[in-house]
């Protein structure tokens, strides 16, 4: 059913009952390991023909954890403690060490004998104390400390190892206290308070220093030499509180309470050398000029939720009635930034009530026992859920962010030193650089204004309505079938409108499709409805963020159908599985023709099913209506006990393949015959167009079978369980990700289903 009124957002909710220890000492040890020596190769001629020379296989992974709990004082005080250390080193398909990393000029030379590795580790230690003060009052204290390193984050066939950042969490502490009081058999009080401190840091690799510049090859999408961001850090201080009271009788269950979150978040950003370079087929084309470092801070004053819900059972009918009030307030403190390269000192006043949203959201559900025998249930739910938010809006509205911290300029490397020799303080064309695409760069002003109508009042926060109708029927004892229809509809979309532009300031053009049999349209077809701003308006920015509904109708809907079966058969045989078919439709055609900026980006519900809008220059309506096909997902799992205490379990899944796009980088010279002039960015400018409509072209489906064989042994007061896992039992080699940059590596796989892997694990309970 739907999420109750206890939460503001809709999501998958997992109810976990934490272990507390007890009056008997007990514990467990678990370990698991796998290495490349236990994995099969699954690269075949078909993949080799698509440019795959290496697979996404494992180097090694490991998992070590242990726990212990018991009494400090019987029937009064207990403890439970656990720790875990786990990680992986994965070989990355078609990604290699750059033999010439750090060279001048920068060059990417793959070392085909050294495959890139995505390496990561995570560590965790936690402890819990439970104090039973008396029969009516129980108190708990929980502490956890975690650390991690994603040591080559996002390394891939399009991100060279030296351009992948290290993501580390040196501070990740949580402390929580709780109180639980069953005053009577019908009345329960609960309360908890939590403090969470988190610091995330991003570092470049050791070969990168403060002057190393990142390079992106536009024809393939490859980022090499350095990350596009340098050192980056964000710090969070979050405080959560909750309390509730429940009253339960035979046919009625009532609960009311509140949740409150407060906190702060700080961002510190830096780009090495303050320049990012882009080349096309090795020829310098564009430079992104950045004004860093910068620091900015946001406050979450309160995210307050007050809820009440009631469940009534009337014969065969059960009603779930709930309502939730939310008040979300963010603010920005006074900020003072020292002078940096390209920017003088900046001072910004505080902004109170960045948001002051108020929402009243119903949660309604009904269940009906159709025949009165408990074997067939018809259920329906509907609820309004809020868009997830902590301080993202305050971050977007922060004056440090709404000032212009980066601009793009065309770059012609006339002297061949692979460095843009320009006067960057002069925003107009000079030396090797064209005019900046935003003439407000370097000015201590904000270029984006936020409409007060989207920040204050009732019903202004992003939301979605979720509804479902399901039926469950018991076919026979311990065998049931379930079917359901699910719908989600999103609202309160935002757009960015550049007030400096009007629709008449754009020139529209069509561009012929390149000759490639893999493109869905036939020969002679064109991409229709591209737009480029007038050169006289280029670089002028005066943005307003407001509701899309101010311009027209926009929608984002998901509709899906599920059918599943749950069979618990004799001799502990288990069979679960089903089919899910759905699609997300996105449309802003009524909006983009009236908004003079980039097309609105709408993040979909089901990532990979429907794409974001492609961001082509407005007011183009190109690809404004996305309707992907219905694509089924099939998932099955089963378990069957075998002789000698052996358990056999297996899973099967069939899911859609990756979406195929074709983003084509064009020079001004290529566009000019169809546009009738150079691009607004100048003769050295580039633009990117989409040759394939989102939601229309997909790769082959992904099929996977996994299996596990387990056996348990009792050794006195201990129990030992051993497991042998076989991932990708049939050694399939489906493509999971591919290059969507139209060029020499278009559709080249960047991630392939790893080959068959044998993994060993064991658990000892004592």
Image (spheres, rainbow, N blue to C red):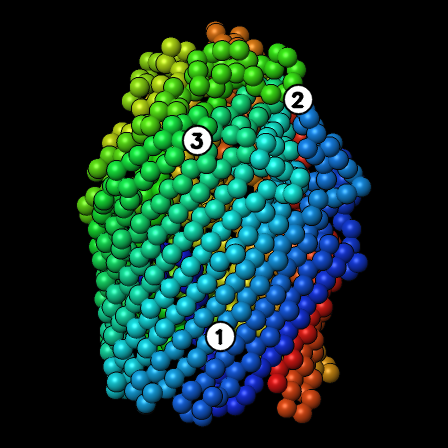
- Seen at 58% across and 25% down, the residue is 278
Q: Secondary structure at mark 2?
A: loop
Q: Nearer the viewer, residue 444 or 256?
A: 444
Give the residue at mark 1: 127
Find residue 497 and report its horizontal and vertical position in percent: 32, 27
Q: Nearer the viewer, residue 155 or 502?
A: 155
Q: Nearer the viewer, mark 1 or mark 3?
A: 3
Find residue 678 and report its horizontal and vertical position in percent: 49, 9
- Using residue 454 as the reference point, say whether residue 296 is left or right of it: right
Q: Identify the image quadrant of the C terminus.
A: bottom right
Q: Residues within 10 Å of mark 3 (few under 14, many from 20)?
A: some
Q: Is residue 491 visible?
A: no
Location of residue 653 by image quarter:
bottom right
- How far apart marks 2 and 3 lie (CA) works out to 31 Å
Total numbered labels: 3
Compare marks 1 and 3 and give the one earlier in the sequence.
Answer: 1
Location of residue 306 by image quarter:
bottom left
Give the residue at mark 2: 282
Compare marks 2 and 3 and give the one earlier in the sequence.
Answer: 2
> Do tag 2 and tag 1 residues touch (Cβ < 8 Å)?
no
Find residue 301 and report its horizontal and vertical position in percent: 27, 53
Q: Nearer the viewer, residue 582 or 302?
A: 302
Q: Nearer the viewer, mark 2 or mark 1?
A: 1
- Seen at 69% across and 89% down, the residue is 715
- Seen at 67% across and 78% down, the residue is 721
Location of residue 216 by image quarter:
top right
> Do tag 2 and tag 3 residues touch (Cβ < 8 Å)?
no
Give the residue at mark 3: 340
Compare marks 2 and 1 and give the one earlier in the sequence.
Answer: 1
**Residue at the farthest left position:** 457
- Seen at 33% across and 68% down, the residue is 193
């Amino acid at each position: 059913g739907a999420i109750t009124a206890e939460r503001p957002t809709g999501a998958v909710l997992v109810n976990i009952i934490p272990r507390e220890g007890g009056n008997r000492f007990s514990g467990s040890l678990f370990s698991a390991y796998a290495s490349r020596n236990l994995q099969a190769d699954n690269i075949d001629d078909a993949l080799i023909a698509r440019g795959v020379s290496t697979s996404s296989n494992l180097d090694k992974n490991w998992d070590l954890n242990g726990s212990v709990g018991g009494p400090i004082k019987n029937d009064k005080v207990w403890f439970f403690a656990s720790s875990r250390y786990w990680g992986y080193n994965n070989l990355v398909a078609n990604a290699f060490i750059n033999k010439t990393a750090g060279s001048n000029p920068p060059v990417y030379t793959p070392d085909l004998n050294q495959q890139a590795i995505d390496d990561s580790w995570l560590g965790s230690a936690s402890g819990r104390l439970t104090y039973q003060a008396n029969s009516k009052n129980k108190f708990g204290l929980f502490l956890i400390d975690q650390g991690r390193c994603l040591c080559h984050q996002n390394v891939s066939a399009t991100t060279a190892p030296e351009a992948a950042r290290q993501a580390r969490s040196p501070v990740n502490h949580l402390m929580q206290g709780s109180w639980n009081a069953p005053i009577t058999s019908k009345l329960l009080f609960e309360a908890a308070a939590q403090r969470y401190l988190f610091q995330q840091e991003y570092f470049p690799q050791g070969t990168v220093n403060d002057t190393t510049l990142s390079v992106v090859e536009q024809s393939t999408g490859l980022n090499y030499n350095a990350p596009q961001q340098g050192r980056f850090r964000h710090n969070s201080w979050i405080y959560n509180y909750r309390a509730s009271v429940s009253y339960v009788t035979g046919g009625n269950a009532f609960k009311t309470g509140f949740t409150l979150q407060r906190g702060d978040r700080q961002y510190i950003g830096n780009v090495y050398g303050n320049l990012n370079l882009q080349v096309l087929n090795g020829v310098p084309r564009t430079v992104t000029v950045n004004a860093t470092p910068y620091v900015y801070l946001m406050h979450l004053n309160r995210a307050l939720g007050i809820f009440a819900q009631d469940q009534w059972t009337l014969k065969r009918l059960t009603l779930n009635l709930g309502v939730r009030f939310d008040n979300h307030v963010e603010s920005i403190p006074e900020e003072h930034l020292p002078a940096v390269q390209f920017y003088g000192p900046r001072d910004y006043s505080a902004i109170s009530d960045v948001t002051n949203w108020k929402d009243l959201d119903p949660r309604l559900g009904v269940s009906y026992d159709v025949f009165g025998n408990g074997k067939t249930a018809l259920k329906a739910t509907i609820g309004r859920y809020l868009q997830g938010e902590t301080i993202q809006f305050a971050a977007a509205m922060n004056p440090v962010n709404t000032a212009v911290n980066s601009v793009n300029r065309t770059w012609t490397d006339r002297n061949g030193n692979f460095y843009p020799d320009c006067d960057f303080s002069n925003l107009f064309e000079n030396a090797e650089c064209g005019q900046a695409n935003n003439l407000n760069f370097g000015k201590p002003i904000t270029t984006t204004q936020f409409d007060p109508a989207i920040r204050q009042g009732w019903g202004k926060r992003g939301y979605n309505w979720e509804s479902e109708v399901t039926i469950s029927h018991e076919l026979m004892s311990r065998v049931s079938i379930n079917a359901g229809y699910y719908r989600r509809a999103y609202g309160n979309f935002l757009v960015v409108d550049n007030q400096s532009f009007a629709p008449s300031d754009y020139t529209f053009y069509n561009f012929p499709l390149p000759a490639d049999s893999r493109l869905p349209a036939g020969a002679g077809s064109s991409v229709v409805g591209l737009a480029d701003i007038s050169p006289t308006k280029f670089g002028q920015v005066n943005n307003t963020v407001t509701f899309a509904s101010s311009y027209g109708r926009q929608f984002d809907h998901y509709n899906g159908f599920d059918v599943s079966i749950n069979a618990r058969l004799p001799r502990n045989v288990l069979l679960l599985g089903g089919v899910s078919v759905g699609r997300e439709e996105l449309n802003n055609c009524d909006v983009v023709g009236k908004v003079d900026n980039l097309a609105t980006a709408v993040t979909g519900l089901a990532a990979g099913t429907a794409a974001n809008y492609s961001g082509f220059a407005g007011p183009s309506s190109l690809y404004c209506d996305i309707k992907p096909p219905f694509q089924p997902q099939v998932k099955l799992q089963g378990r069957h006990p075998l002789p000698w205490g052996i358990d056999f379990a297996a899973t099967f899944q069939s899911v859609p393949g990756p979406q195929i796009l074709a983003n084509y980088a064009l020079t001004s010279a290529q566009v000019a015959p169809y546009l009738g002039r150079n691009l607004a960015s100048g003769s050295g400018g580039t633009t990117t167009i989409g040759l394939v409509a989102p939601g229309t072209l997909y790769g082959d489906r992904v099929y996977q079978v996994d299996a596990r064989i387990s056996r348990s042994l009792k050794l006195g007061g201990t129990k030992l369980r051993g497991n042998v896992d076989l991932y990708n039992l049939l050694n399939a080699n489906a493509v999971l990700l591919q290059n969507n940059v139209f060029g020499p590596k278009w559709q080249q796989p960047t991630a392939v289903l790893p080959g068959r892997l044998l993994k060993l694990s064991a658990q000892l309970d004592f």
